[in-house]
Image (cartoon, rainbow, N blue to C red):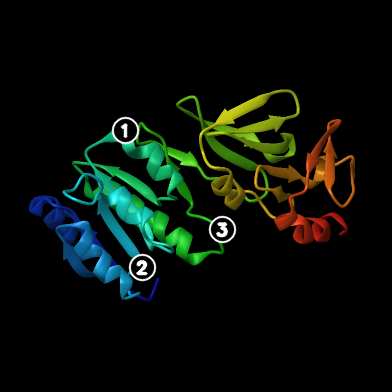
Amino acid sequence: MSHKINCIIVDDEPLARDVLVKYAAQIDQLEVIASCSNALEAFEHIQKGQVQLLFLDIKMPKVSGLELIESIKNPPLVVFTTAYREFAIKAFELDAIDYLLKPISITRFLKTISKVNKYLQGPHTEPPTDISDTGNPLPTTSEMEYLYIKSDRKVMKLHLNDIHYLESLNDKVIIHLAEKEVTTTQRISYLAEKLPRKRFIRIHRSYIISLAHISAYNNIMVEINGRELPIGRNYRSQALEALRK
């Protein structure tokens, strides 16, 4: 790529920051505009709107890297850098580009930059790589074929054609498939963002349905697999518009 990618490095350990600054200096396209010792300092740089890529430690005093990303409405691309494997699933939920385990080698760093380039060069609905709690790459949710969810301490790959509808119940979401049900603690609003809107619509605060599996509908309900699901008042206009297409 010909243009520079503005990045900042955030870590409370000076040596860890120095390693990444040294690596970044070997890549012409990377421009390190700040090296920060805490999340609050990084937040100030991000608010200026000039940061495209963030190398972010997780465990830091006062505000963690995860808390920083959760507090930003439209964060830059994020690469988490940490010595801890156990936060990888949470990083996956926050759409991290990559998850680097310390000590970070230059070879692994270059692989990450390759992923960043791949994302920036093409039209994507989300970052190209997610991570498992072992630090190994996982495929992302495909806009056309699959949904990846966290269930029972595993990441499950669900084919979109098999998903009939999603039901939010108390503190969990039940995904009704062709022949079984899968439960996740991920929020229904998060899952709604992952599903292609041409194939799935939200009809109620508690329901997202697959357009392909509707057997009947009217102004107040949708029928799938013999079950009548209510269309919420706040979703009615948008839902009926989609159903009539």
Q: Amino acid at mark 3?
A: Thr
Does the residue at mark 2 contact the one at mark 3 (Cβ under 8 Å)?
no
What residue is pinned by disc 2?
A: 52
Q: Is residue 199 left or right of residue 79?
A: right
Residue 79, horizontal then vertical, whole percent: 33, 52
Q: Amino acid at mark 2?
A: Gln
Visible in this render: residue 28?
no
Task: Determine the residue positioned at 54% across, 36% down.
Answer: 149
Task: Determine the residue positioned at 35% across, 36% down.
Answer: 135
Name the mark on residue 125: 3
Which residue is outermost to the front? 233
Work out whether mark 1 precedes mark 3 in sequence or the reverse, and give the earlier one.
1
Q: Quadrant of residue 5?
A: bottom left
Q: Nearer the viewer, mark 1 or mark 3?
A: 1
Most foreground residue, 179 or 186? 186
Determine whether 182 is above or below 94 in the image: above
What residue is pinned by disc 1?
A: 86
Task: Determine the residue positioned at 73% across, 34% down.
Answer: 162
Name the mark on residue 133: none
* Numbered disc 1: secondary structure: helix
